Amino acid sequence: MPTTIAPNDRRLVFTSSQAAEYLGVSLATIRRWTDAGHVACYRTPGGQRRFSRAQLDRFIASMSQPGPVGAVRADDARVA
């Protein structure tokens, strides 16, 4: 049974699973977001992702900022 992580959790470092749970998304989503550069992380010498609480909180704050979300460039909007 997964452990529920409260938004006021005081831990400083999260694994991918813990970060996904903290943000309320799936593990696959957190992986996609880090690969795309939307969520910052660092890698252990073994290649595992680690997230600081500050990084996750900055991501949450950025999601509440006004601005173009999902903006499409003109090149991407062309129909083939």
Image (cartoon, rainbow, N blue to C red):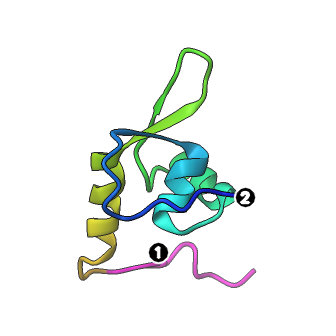
Question: Which mark, residue 1?
Answer: 2
Front-most of residues 71 and 12: 12
Q: Nearer the viewer, mark 1 or mark 2?
A: 2
The numbered disc on residue 48 is: none
- Give, as a single range, the part of the protein colored magenta: 68-80
Residue 28 place in picture, x, y as percent: 69, 57
Residue 49 on the magenta span: no
Location of the C terminus by quadrant is bottom right
Q: Which residue is mark 1?
A: 73
- Name the spot of residue 39 as percent of width and height, x first: 43, 52
Q: Nearer the viewer, residue 43 or 77?
A: 43
Identify the residue at image location x=47%, y=64%. 23
> Cα distance, mark 1 to mark 2?
43 Å
Assign the N terminus to one quadrant of the image. bottom right
Number of on-image labels: 2
Q: Nearer the viewer, residue 58 or 79?
A: 58
Q: Can you say whether 2 is above or below 71 in the image?
A: above
Q: Residue 5 location, x and y as percent?
A: 48, 59
